[in-house]
Image (cartoon, helix red, strand yellow):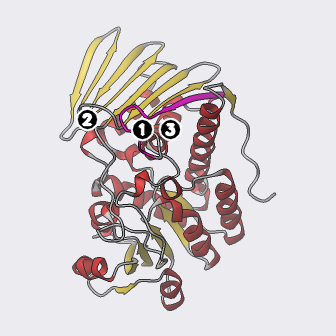
Amino acid sequence: MLKGAIVGLGNVAVNGHLPGWEGCGQARVVAAADALEARLARERWRLPGARFYTDVPAMLAAEALDFLDICTPPGTHASLTRLALSRGLHVLCEKPLVLSPDELQSVRYAQVESGRVLYTVHNWLYAPIISQTTELIREGTIGRVRRINWQVRRCEPSIAVGPQGAGGNGTGGKETIPDNWRLDPAMAGGGILLDHGWHALYIILRWLGHAPKMISASLEKRAHPEWPVEDTATVRLNGPEATADIFLTWASSARGNSAVIEGALGTIHVDDDTLRLTDDGGERRWTFDQPLSRGSHHPDWFSRVRDDFLREISDETRQGTNLAEASLCAQLLHLAKESHARGGEAIAVGDLPKADG
């Protein structure tokens, strides 16, 4: 039985990770850390017998752990990941794994030095409608993918709370975080591009089956010019055989998620809770219990992530696949920002530098 600790008891931990660890036969959470005593007190009932800390280094010094589950805001991910890896722990980290190429290089180097698993939570892959779509593509139902269109429409950022509420960075530090850290560039790394763009990229990369050759992007403040981050992002990925267009906004009048995947033999339409496949045989339709736009704090999605993380720990042949995928997402988002800074210019996607050099 592996022993783990969770850091950051905000919404994603309380609604996704903690219930997702319940009943796991291979691992259990024996400790938790958060900057706020009140938040620790409120969630003690979820972890009977666990120890609670307001300081992560103190927790790591006191506990005999195998892994750390990081649920803090993104601005803390790199430092916490390096700390955990340096203590010989496997790391499960919420997305985005890092906010910059320098952070990516540092955590990849720490992972190589430690020999431990570093795994990012790509939980939307396990949403039933996304899993079904992926399976149809893998089966060759629509042939070679030629074009993907992905859209996320939101009226505002997801709720995230600061040091006076149920969020915070969980590190024991004294940094001041706005009531919604998603609007703090230092803590979020950007606006909707980093928040929803990471999900879009790891899903699209699975559907394409290869990395793009070029990327271009435009970031806008359509409804909230006063915000320090963008509320709308448009991204295009170009490859030798396929293109993908991504549109993300917090400035919509209604919530929704949709995708269209065009292949040589047919087309898949994803529309929140409905999946349609059209090909020479006509149309097939599937309806799912919950729309994608309802949110991502699903313990059942996280349980699949959890199991894959544990498989990477136990099976060396599986190690590194998720980290490679997360590393490419980090690179693409950095290049998207660079493209915007250059007026939307298309930028070549190069190879990632080796983590050991």
Q: Is residue 312 visible?
A: no
The amino acid pointed to by label 3 is: Leu
The amino acid pointed to by label 2 is: Arg
Q: Is residue 203 left or right of residue 180?
A: right
Residue 120 location (% of width, % of height): 50, 56
Q: Which residue is mark 2?
A: 255
Mark 2 or 1, closer to the camera: 1
Residue 319 location (% of width, % of height): 59, 57
Q: Which residues are magenta?
A: 211-227
Mark 2 or 3, closer to the camera: 2
The disc, 2 or 3, on the residue closer to the chain's N-terminal end is: 3
Q: What numbered label is drawn on residue 201?
A: 3
The disc, 1 or 3, on the residue closer to the chain's N-terminal end is: 3
Mark 1 or 3, closer to the camera: 1
Q: What numbered label is drawn on residue 225?
A: 1
Disc 2/disc 1 C-alpha distance (Å): 21 Å
Q: Quadrant of the N terminus?
A: bottom left
Q: Is residue 273 above or below residue 269?
A: below
Question: Quadrant location of residue 81?
Answer: bottom right
> In terms of secondary structure, where does tag 2 sit?
loop
> In terms of secondary structure, where does tag 3 sit?
helix
Q: Is residue 199 left or right of residue 105?
A: left
Q: Residue at x 48, y 18 (%)?
A: 143
Residue 222 among magenta residues:
yes
Disc 2/disc 3 C-alpha distance (Å): 20 Å
Q: Residue at x 44, y 50 (%)?
A: 122
Residue 170 location (% of width, % of height): 43, 73
Q: Is residue 53 above or below residue 258?
A: below
> In terms of secondary structure, where does tag 1 sit?
loop
Question: Quadrant location of residue 28?
Answer: bottom left
Crowding at mark 3 (Cα within 10 Å: few <14, some 14-19, many 20+): many
